[in-house]
Image (tube, helix red, strand yellow):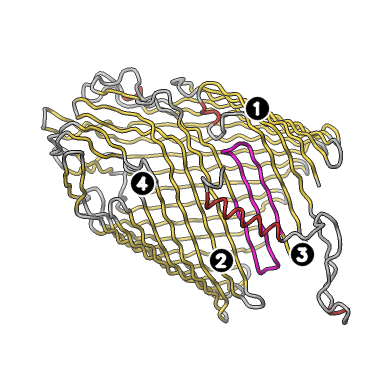
Amino acid sequence: MSSGKYPCISHLFAAGLALCCAAVPAGAGQERPALTAAGAAGDAGQQEPAVYYETEGDYYLGYRWLSDEDSLKAAEYIYPHSSVTLGLDLVSCPLPYRYHVNAEYLSNYDYYTDAGFAYKDLVLFRDILVGVHHNLDHSNYQYAGEPPELIYTDRNAWDDYYVDFVSNLLSLRLKAPDFPLHTFVNQRHVEREGKVEQRFLLGDFNEIHKVSEARDVDWNSNALKLGANSHLGPVEVEYAYDQADFDPNGNDILHDAYPASVDFARPGDSYPHNVVPETESAAHSVKMHSSYTGGLVAAATLSSLNEKNNYSGTESTTWKGAFDFSWIPDPAVGLFFKYRHKDVDLDTPGSTTLTGLVNTLNYPVRQGISYDKDVFSLSSRYRPGKLVTLFATYEFSHLDRQDVDAWLVLPGQSNTHTINLTANARPLDKVKVTAGYEYKNFSQPAYNLTPDSSNKLRLTSTWMPLAWLNVYLEYILSLTERNSLNYLNSEPAVLLEIGERDGRHDQFLASLTSELSARASLTGSWFYQRWDVEQDLAYGKWLTAGAGDLPYLDAAVPYTDEANSFSLSLFYLLRPDLSLTADVTYTITRGKTDYDGVVGGESFSLDSFSALKASETVCSLELAKRLSKEWEVRLRSYVDVYNDREYDLLDGNVFTTIFSIKRYF
């Protein structure tokens, strides 16, 4: 990564390394006592104690061989080419200075660096730089049996899609000497560069074109936070200013030729579509809280946020308020109250302009939804004895929407009631159990995916029957129920409240860790989850051209997805200088929706588009040989095989081997 390409990241990171390097005195790798304070010849009782420090760490150099076949689904987050690898792990505490560097380089697009520096409690600096290469799927949605009215066009059929992600997070905190005043700076810079697949529709209702084409992205976002906090008597106060912006740079708008449309009063022309807008925001916040010592603690926060879409002109102003109060009258009893308020004022332009090469058209825009939201929460903790702790929480949420007249599906208000009960217990000396139950009731839910009510049960246990054996079990059950769904029919224009939706989610995790001997340990786990839902679906019905009817109804359509994942991990110290680590994971997932065989007399079934069945096998093996006290060689092999069992479109495998030489110091 060149400094010219990423000026912000390189400058910040260089500044951090300069601070770190400047903090290291000569001979930092040796042990020696720290110098005493000035005036050491005086009274020995006024001398600083002798402090010893040591610089230690390691660095390595290696090479990564990589081979892949077919789809890169098996190597989703791996740069698919061989490369040199290197790394550094360094910690030093020449008091009053402290610093660390942890860095790993796998390729030009996959790396991690964490560097930090501190001087007493007056200066604290840290910089984290992360780079990740993300391989993206190239979709193929031209399945056999598609209606003849659909025309599929892939303008870049042989392109590979990917995004290179870079994130730099910098933080700096300064403290005034001998006074509780801190100032801080947090800055994050994110870049996404690569080529992605853009899919969109062209044509008209009788001849729809499904188009796929490559789109270059070069997106940058920056977020900066400045603030200060201090103790003012028994109260601590903090002020912070946040600023963020997103810049899509070039290629933020695509253009294509659209045919004339009678329905939208649009003449044929080349029009813009799939806009990626430039955005910006700024926020102010004030926080204060009383001393955390004692039985009574209060805290309050007030913040404002202004956001703007520079393409559409949409602006949003958000005010947030929070108040927390806790009372602990006894070590066994605690009471906690929380209040949250959020006011969102959304201002959208009354119209938008569609500008083609020849035509300029204006369309009205519905006013966006502004809303007020209030959340009240009351919690308690009770510990009747050393073996049991009980928790109870009640929460009420009220959402009041404005400007909903043009949004027929949205209700003006929605309320949510939540009750949560949790118990932690130690029924036996080597057994820990946690049981939790949560009930939610939704009044006037806005979306069909939101239930009228939900129930959730969570059970976990940890058991150590033997000193070398640990067993962990977890089970989660969720039930949802919705009695009246909302469907907005286009012709005739009417809001239908029909249909039901019921769901069930099961999740189970079992993990067993055993220390087979002083030189070997084994961990095995099984993860299982299943989601079942039955929902009444509605499909638009057209009798003749321009004339519609009430929709088709497909009652109690079942959907199921299921996943099983098995893993086994072994560590074995073959000799004092030779260790082996082996891992294997096998995951299988499947999903299916059983629609009605034929909808509206069409010759195709929607079932053909809903099936999912895939498996993934991941194996890794690592050998580490200590040549001496300072030197070590390491060999690691990794295999990932992805099997798309339903369509064979994403089948692929990747094989990686890394050989490295490490030096300890």
Residue drawn 56% across and 66% down? 184
Q: Nearer the viewer, mark 1 or mark 4?
A: 1
- Residue hosting label 4: 451
Mark-to-mark CA distance, 2 and 3: 23 Å
Question: Disc 2 on helix, strand or loop?
Answer: strand
Q: Is residue 651 left or right of residue 311?
A: right
* In this view, 341 is above or below 462: below
- The disc at residue 95 is 3
- The disc at residue 184 is 2
User: Mark 3 or mark 4, which has the lower sequence index?
Assistant: 3
Coordinates of residue 473 in the picture (x, y in percent): 62, 42
Residue drawn 26% across and 40% down? 272
- Residue hosting label 1: 65
Q: Which region of the structure is painted magenta? A: 99-128
Mark-to-mark CA distance, 1 and 4: 50 Å
Q: Quarter of the image holding residue 334?
A: bottom right
Q: Nearer the viewer, mark 4 or mark 2?
A: 2
* In this view, 451 is above or below 305: above
Q: Is residue 104 magenta?
A: yes
Residue drawn 45% across and 57% down? 419
